[in-house]
Structures are given as structure tokens and as C-alpha cells.
Image (cartoon, rainbow, N blue to C red):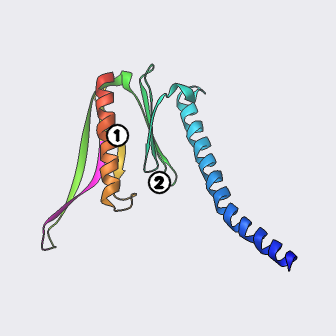
Amino acid sequence: METSTSIIGLVLILITIFPIFLLLRSQHQNKNKIETILKGFNQGNSAEFSDRDTINNKIVAFNEQKKKIVLIDLNTKPELVSYVDLNEISDCKITRETEHNYDSPRKKEFITKVELKFKHKADLQESVMKFYDFEYEKPIQITYYRDNQLAEKWLELIKKSI
């Protein structure tokens, strides 16, 4: 009787601990992946990216001293990494692409993309940071809302830095 109770207790403990272990391992791997990406953009020192935001598996990191910004989107496979050196940028604006659905009784409009567009000083070429893309995101309105807020916040910080 005591042996069977001990075995059942041990199995229940393992069933409880195993998912927690997998979650912690996954978080550790993501953290290492992010640090490796940031080190690649800053000559081996990810600590200089002092300002960081994380929402919906998107990480925005900003090096205020060197004026560099990195957006890492972990929702896409492989992850999408966008890098911009703000010393080379003359202007930044936010753009939103929308689609209209006229087939339904109520005409619906929904956002399909939210991007920051950067205009370079030298050649007036544009580079893009995608904060929200309907193609990769789950079609949930709250995801768009949070990603849009993140883009608005970083647009203000970028305009102050330019």
C-alpha cells in the first residue's frame, strides 16, 4: 500500500514539474537567441541596448548612445530581425495598410500592416520595420492594438533621437 502510494505521488509530481521545466527551458532558449542577435548588432555587447520593450513575441531594443534600434519578431519562422542606425535617418513615419470587406452587411475595415518607414539621409531610400502583419499574426484585434501602441511609442522616441 505504501509503495503504490509513493509511486502515484512521484508520478503526479513528475507530471506537474515536466511542463514547468519545458516552459523554463523554452524561455531560456529565447532569451539566449535574443542576446545573440543583439550582440551581433553591437560588436558583442548586448547590454548597451538599454531600452527594451516586449509585446506579443516582439522585442524592440534601443541603444541610446549609438542611436541604433533593433526589432526582433519571434512570431515568424525564422525570426524577422530589422535593424536601423538612426544616425543615417532623416525622417520616420508610421504607415498602416487596411483592407475593406464590403461583402458583409456592415462594411468592415481592418488593419493588415503597421510599419515604421525610415528615410535615409544619403540616398533617400526607405527601410521598414514591421510591427504588425496580418499574414503572420493571429487575426485577433487585441494583437493589432498592442502592436500599434508599441509602434506609436517607438515612433515618438525615434523622432526625439533623429
Residue designated by label 1:
128
Q: Residues within 10 Å of mark 2 (few under 14, many from 20)?
A: few
Q: Tag on residue 76?
A: 2
Q: Eyeballing the image, is 14 above or below 34?
A: below
Q: Residue furthest front?
A: 2
Q: Answer with left or right where residue 22 lies relative to residue 117.
A: right
In this rendered view, identify the residue nearer to me: 12 or 97: 12
Determine the residue located farthest toward the bottom in the rendered image. 1
Residue 72 position, x and y percent, is: 47, 42
Residue located at (43% from left, 23% from top): 64
Q: Residues within 10 Å of mark 1 (few under 14, many from 20)?
A: some
Q: Residue furthest top?
A: 65
Residue occupying the point 58% across, 43% down: 31
Q: With 34 as the anchor, is 63 left or right in this view?
A: left
Q: Measuring 63% from the left and 46% from the top, which residue is drawn there?
A: 28
Give the magenta part as a residue range.
105-115
- The image quarter in which residue 90 lies: top left
Q: Residue at x 58, y 47 (%)?
A: 30
Q: Could you say whether the residue bearing mark 1 is in a helix, strand or loop?
A: strand
**Front disc: 2 or 1:** 2
Question: Can residue 122 be seen?
Answer: no
Residue 115, position in %: x, y?
A: 31, 44
Type of residue at label 2?
Thr
Describe the element under mark 2 as helix, strand or loop. loop
